[in-house]
Amino acid sequence: MAEIQLKNVSKRWGNFVAVDAFDLAIADEEFLVLLGPSGCGKTTTMRMIAGLEEITDGEIFIGERLVNRLEPKDRDIAMVFQSYGLYPTMSVYENIRFPLKVRRVAKDEHHERVMRAAKMVELTDFLERRPAELSGGQRQRVALARAIVRQPTVFLMDEPLSNLDAKLRVSTRSQIKNLHHELRTTTIYVTHDQIEAMTLADRVVVMNKGVVQQVGTPLEIYDRPANTFVAGFIGSPAMNLIDGTIGDGVFTGQNVTIKGLPATVSGPVTLGFRAEDAAARPDGGGEIAAPIFSLELLGEASMVTVQAGGALVAVKVPKDFAAEIGSAFSAAVPAGICHLFDAESGKRIA
Ligand code: ATP
């Protein structure tokens, strides 16, 4: 069993709070992604779990064991970093085998375990090479194999794809997903890339400034963001967020009027909707009406942006949508696709 529990875990350096009362149970076999912008405390959280950083407050359990005072080597965790950390003078085979030697695993098991790990990440043909003779993606796969070979109870991965180019990132991401499907090892994965989080995670933890903003499945986070920070971080493009006032179920703001919203809410609010949920209204009469600010072809569709509610708002349109910058544009933004957030706290209202 490799359930991991963080109970009110905090990290402070002097007065600076890097992680504030992180409280979460990670299930056995779960793939948990810590997501957030640079400096939000993801790596610090991960390093506390690994035992590389002392905890200021709180408790961490791995399985039944309180590990606060346990050395990293005694936590039965394997880590994979952004920088691969391979030994340049060793062959791929020896790099993968290294943790077995260090841990004094019986010699007669080495070959089979190395070959099994190498096969899982498709490195069987490269075992004689040195790291310098490999591509970035292959090097990262050696690092993955070296983590796999140990058969740890937990994998910790810190931005393992960020040194790879876009294409390799996608294929290595699939490989990680497939590995987790095969091995079912509890995994905590750190990234600032919301697409990685959405594609890999069973659950995502969105963090900002050391504070957990929301924990949920990728769809929960996408469909019902808990606040404007999460709404503005998830999705490409992120959710449109516009300022205005609501009263009697009608939201009004610059270039926008939306009827049929909950009549129980009144006063200043932030209204959110996704570019793909809105639609162009070529004949006019939509909830948003404004001149086109930009029109971009994305490939499978195009994106129009207009100024509304104090922000640039994106609306997805068909790829053959023809219009000039500056010409009149109207979009249907029905109440049913809208999210409402408190104007001050940013918290979700409806
Ligand atoms: P990134 O994506 O850039 O790696 P992150 O979310 O992983 O960011 P952390 O590395 O966890 O962020 O850092 C969280 C905060 O703690 C940052 O503001 C960082 O400057 C601060 N921090 C990290 N290590 C120390 C330290 N040893 N002393 C003081 N502050 C630190």
Image (cartoon, rainbow, N blue to C red):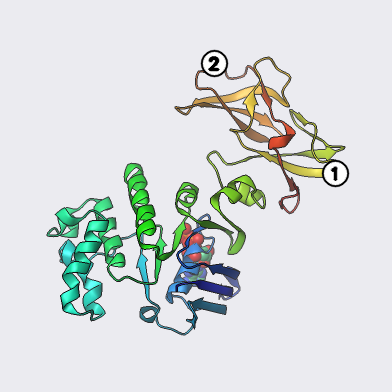
Front position in the image: 44 or 326:
44
Q: Left or right of 274: which side holds 204? A: left
Residue in the picture at 39% in, 72% down: 153
Q: Amino acid at mark 1?
A: Ser
Provide residue 164's location: percent of width, then percent of height: 33, 49
Report which residue position mark 2 lands on.
322
Residue ID at (68%, 40%): 272
Residue that protrudes farthest toward the left in the picture: 128
Q: Is residue 308 left or right of residue 170?
A: right
Q: Residues within 10 Å of mark 2 (few under 14, many from 20)?
A: few
Give the tally of numbered discs: 2
Q: CA distance from mark 1 to mark 2?
A: 38 Å
Who comes first in sequence, dot 1 or dot 2?
1
Name the residue rendered at 66%, 30% in the picture.
Answer: 307
Q: Disc 1 on helix, strand or loop?
A: loop
Q: Please state which of residues 21 and 264 is positioned toward the viewer in this rendering.
A: 264
Give the residue at the far right of this rendering. Answer: 248
Q: Nearer the viewer, residue 185 or 89?
A: 185
Instruction: Answer left or right for 297 relative to 233.
Output: left
Quarter residue 124 falls in: bottom left
Read off the residue under disc 1.
266
- Looking at the image, residue 309 lies above or below residue 282: below
Work out whether residue 41 or residue 248 is closer to the camera in this orientation and state it.
Answer: 248
Q: What's under tag 2, amino acid-wise?
A: Ala
| Residue 80 visible to the viewer | yes
Marks 1,2: beta carbons within 8 A: no
The image position of residue 297, as x and y in percent, is 48, 25
The CB of the residue at mark 2 lies under 8 Å from ligand 1: no
- Residue 174 vs 84, above or below: the answer is above
Judged from the image, the secondary structure of the residue bearing numbered disc 2 is: loop
Compared with 273, 94 (above or below) is below
